[in-house]
Amino acid sequence: MRISPAPVLRFLGLRLLSSAIVLLGVIVVVFALVHLVPGDPVRLALGTRYSPEAYQALREASGLDRPLLVQFFSYVGNALTGNLGVSFRNGGTVTDILLGRLPATVSLALVGIVIALVIALPAGIWSALREGRVSDIIVRLTSQLGVSVPDFWLGMLLITLFSSVLRVLPSSGYAPAGEDPLGWLQHVILPGLTVGLIAGAIMTRYIRAAVVDVAGAGFVRTAVSKGLPGRIVTFRHILRNALVPVLTIAGIQLATILGGVIVVEVVFAWPGLGRLVYDSVAARDYPVIQGAILLIAAMFLLINLIVDVLYALVDPRIRLA
Amino acid sequence: MNRRIPLLATAAAVALALAGCTTGTGVDLGGSSSGATFVAAIGGEPDQLDPHKTSSYFSFEVLENVFDTLVQPDDQLQMEPALATSWETSDDQLTWTFHLRDDVTFQDGSAFTAADVVYSYERIIDENLSNAWKFSSVASVTASDDTTVVITLTQPTPNLLSNLGGFKGMAIVQKKNVEDGDIATAPIGTGPYQLTEYVAGDHITLTANPDYWGGAPKIETIEYKFISEPATALAALKSGEIQWTDVVPPQQVDSLEDDSSISVGVTPSSDYWYLALNEAKAPWNDVKVRQAIAYAIDRTAIIQAVSYGTAQANQLAIPEASAWYTEYDTYPQTADLDTAKQLLAEAGYTGGTLDMLATSDYPETVTAAQIIASNLEPLGITVNIRQPDFSTWLDEQNSGNFDMLMMGWLGNIDPDDFYYAQHHTDGSSNAQKYSNAEVDAFLDAGRVETDQDKRKDDYAQAAKIIADEASYIYLYNPAVIQIWSPKLEGYEARADRAIRFKDASLAK
């Protein structure tokens, strides 16, 4: 099977173009949302007692006195050059603030997705191949439980067990993996488990469904009836064909974790993007909120793009279509 | 194409190996091994560390230990010497001369002089920073020599000391630190601790300043962590990862007080919460209608609901711990509907609706509003509760678009802060439009009275009339709640919420 580069490149180009359009839409929506939400950041920054002069001075310094359209176009123009503005709260550049938080969130998301895959791949496949048996029912019930558990509750449970009772793991905080690998590992386990167990439960159900689906297909029956050994049917026919839906759900879960671990990051005092968004919303720090949402959207699109490319590699029908 | 399966298998194996590492690893929990490091958990990350620009309490929890002011509040919230050792006022009360310590250095080793005081105050005034209003009566700040600062005023200002030293928002900063642009993240002060590390999102480390003018602090290193989830903070305190936190839900105070492994500090703060009725509107302009509401509300129930009983009931603003406290208990602690109904009858009020302005940004206002609504129902008053965000709330208050509101004033020290702006006819925060010539006279007298006892009496008189006429219906002083390890000695929770670790020590 020879892969010609031309269709793949064309496929990639189209996907990139559509991603750019989606990103532009995200900028418009986020900008509008953030500025339409009630609450005056200047007033919040000043507290309850201040002079009108102080109010005006801060308003001008933060550019909020300009017409909304002017603010929007200058924002888009700057964003295209990587300048996402300056935080209202501390005057730091948003790009630096976001980049500073990225390693914590990405490392937590990767640990979470690895734990999820380690659980979901064997459990989902095993359960599907034993459809209807006791082991299948146990996996399905357990994963249903995992899907239903709120993440903050699971986090508190793990803290109580491992930090308060057993005292083997720190309850919260962070150490950069580059400087203190062991410290990082100790700190990432509990939030990683919280994220991973829940994502794992969700993925188990999807993987099981995908494998069950493929296992019932006509070509599998053909393979079995022409006398191929069960192991070959399982690996070559069933699992390979179940790979596309598995990739989809893994990609979506990874993207969800990257953008959506706000609660887990708050519970574990994990200095990532989610925690940043939480703090910035409370302070109406528009530039940081906009930048963070933009970054999360961009990561979401990037992962989707990677998943699309992987589809094309896994399934030739997709890249030729 | 078959090689992809082994790849997947390898990935799974690596993942399994990683997961294997995650259990059974012997763990050295922070704090126990690093000896003198003291870890304090605060509820969130400071927005910035420039004391003149931040309004975040999280910032001041750190900066309290990094900066100094000319004077500072003592345990009774009376102003005591700090960077200034003494001061005198001219006969006309318009010139204050401060004598400064001559043995003070900034944490980078440079000398502290009167020029730094002038620079700091002029920065707040000239740049119109949020605390500029504290200098509203200041005409000029000059240094007559290295250890003398002269402040001239446009009118006598007896609360000048609490304006200058009430909190670290009035800190003396270093010009170079400001002009370098470092002050927001690497501030340099004259205080007992210097900031040595700031990892955004994770922690701030302070190190003892051995040259501190008040003597080197005993605890060598303080690390501030940002934990906003109370259950996490409590778990961290119990496991010894942190030694101090104020991230404590009030409902847990009772059970924590029974726990011998934790020291609990609960003290009424100088903050206060109140109700105010809009006197620009009928029927609330009738003093009897306002008094009826003051009699009808169930203060005990409100305090229980908003604070689980940790707040201190107070029918005036100033807390018991303050030297300016006045006793006053005209109104009942639980609802007295008979008196309320009688007052309404005398006023000729037969019932109607009341537009109550609460705000979702301060949940206690919403909780209390619900209780008040049921308290007033038997009087024929239907309470409609609104709960916009705080900046909308401020707009509504300032444009007089409310019948009753509930809010708190935070961080006041001098009685003038507690009463003048809120109740003087010309007060800048008199949103309820209260006006009483007698109260105005007492409040004006308090502003120029130099005899402490007479001044205290002026404010006591004013406060009683204010409460009698229900300009504000005072409810309570909320508690400062902090918990710490019993190993922490020499530390007390303060009414002004200042977190001072200068005199604390850690037992082995």
Image (spheres, rainbow, N blue to C red):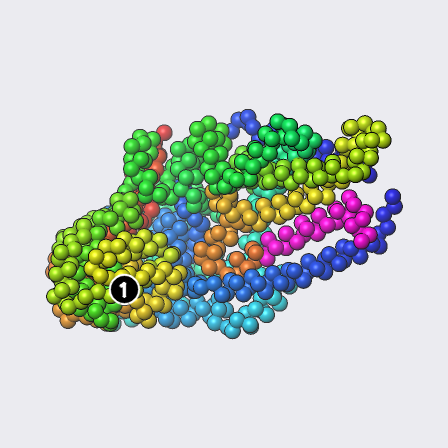
Q: Residue at image x 78%, y 28%? A: A230
**Above or below B14: residue A248:** below
Image-quadrant location for residue A133: top right
- Where the N terminus of chain A falls, by quadrant? top right
Q: Residue B150: x and y, percent? A: 27, 65
User: Horizontally, is B492 left or right of A179 in the view?
Assistant: left
* Residue B190 in sight here: no
Nearest to the observer: residue B110 or residue B79: B79
Q: What is the chain letter for disc 1? A: B
Q: Residue at image x 62%, y 27%? A: A135
Q: Is residue A304 magenta?
A: yes
Q: Is residue B250 magenta?
A: no
Q: Residue B62: x and y, percent? A: 39, 48
Q: Which residue is mark 1?
A: B354
Q: Residue A256: x and y, percent? A: 59, 47
> Label 1 neighbourhood size at 10 Å, few (<14), some (14-19), many (20+)?
some
Image-quadrant location for residue A220: top right
Nearest to the observer: residue B91 or residue B30: B30
**Above or below B478: residue B242:** above
User: Horizontally, is A59 left or right of B263 in the view?
Assistant: right
Range drawn in magenta: A294-321
Secondary structure beneath label 1: strand
Q: Residue A120: x and y, percent? A: 64, 35
Q: Three-letter amino acid code at disc 1?
A: Leu
User: Horizontally, is B498 left or right of A77 in the view?
Assistant: left
Name the magenta segment's main secondary structure.
helix
Q: Residue at image x 50%, y 73%? A: A66
Nearest to the observer: residue A109 or residue A309: A309
Image-quadrant location for residue B447: bottom left
User: Horizontally, is A225 left or right of A125 in the view?
Assistant: right
Q: Residue at image x 60%, y 62%? A: A27
* Residue A136 in sight here: yes
